[in-house]
Image: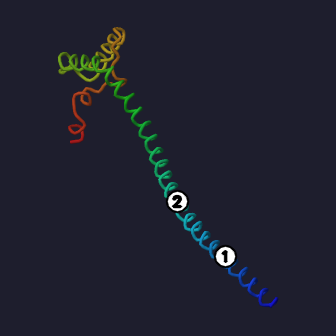
Amino acid sequence: ASSKERLDKCLGVMRDLDEKVQRLKDDFATKTAEAERLKASLQKAEEVLGAAMELLEKLSGEQTRWEAMEHDLSAESSALPANVMLSAMFITYLADEQEAARQSFLQQAAELLHRAKLSSSESFDLLGFLSSEGELLK
């Protein structure tokens, strides 16, 4: 009877161990599936972060370009009154003059405008100022 009891006891312990092993296997499967989901989420987050970083780099370049463009437009805008005056002087007084006289007169006029706190473009170009880019390309 003692061996039968011992066998029953061992079988009971074995069943308990089998149940525990099954629970651990189930828990392991659950944890493994959760780890895979987390891994996939992390990979997606890294992809989104990479795309965001790339976009930020591009936007930084755009910001630099826009700042340069704003600076150019600001310079053109501040030179506009003087350039208009130089254009009007050229058309009114210099149309029939030779190139040397034109350059001399425009230089003197630019100096007078500068003294009057009206600065023209660094290198004033009448044709470039009065024409659109499309007209210049024709």
Mark 1 Cα within 10 Å, few/some/many (few <14, many 20+)?
few
Q: Locate residue 137 relative to residue 2 in the image: left or right.
A: left
- Disc 1 marks a residue whose amino acid type is Val
Coordinates of residue 63 in the picture (x, y in percent):
42, 36
Residue 72, compared with residue 109, is above or below; it is below
Q: Locate residue 87 relative to residue 24 in the image: left or right.
A: left
Number of marks in picture = 2
- Please tell me whether mark 2 sits on a helix, a strand or a loop: helix
In the rendered image, which quarter is residue 13 located in? bottom right
Kindly identify the residue that appears in the image at 29 percent across and 27 percent down.
Answer: 125
Label placed on residue 44: none
Coordinates of residue 14 in the picture (x, y in percent):
71, 82
Coordinates of residue 100 in the picture (x, y in percent):
29, 21
Residue at numbered disc 2: 43
Q: Quadrant where the C terminus lies?
A: top left
- Disc 2 marks a residue whose amino acid type is Gln
Residue 84, compared with residue 19, is above or below; it is above
Coordinates of residue 40 in the picture (x, y in percent):
51, 62
Kindly identify the residue that appears in the image at 23 percent across and 22 percent down.
Answer: 98
Residue 136, compared with residue 78, is above or below; it is below
Residue at numbered disc 1: 21
- Furthest residue toward top: 116
Q: Locate residue 34 relative to residue 11 in the image: left or right.
A: left
Q: Nearer the viewer, residue 103 or 46?
A: 46
Q: Earlier in the sequence, mark 1 or mark 2?
A: 1
Residue 137, compared with residue 131, is above or below; it is below
Q: Nearer the viewer, residue 44 or 37?
A: 37
- Please tell me whether mark 1 sits on a helix, a strand or a loop: helix
In the rendered image, which quarter is residue 8 located in? bottom right
Between marks 1 and 2 in the image, the one whose residue lies nearer the viewer:
1
Q: Nearer the viewer, residue 108 or 112?
A: 112
Q: Locate residue 74 relative to residue 33 in the image: left or right.
A: left
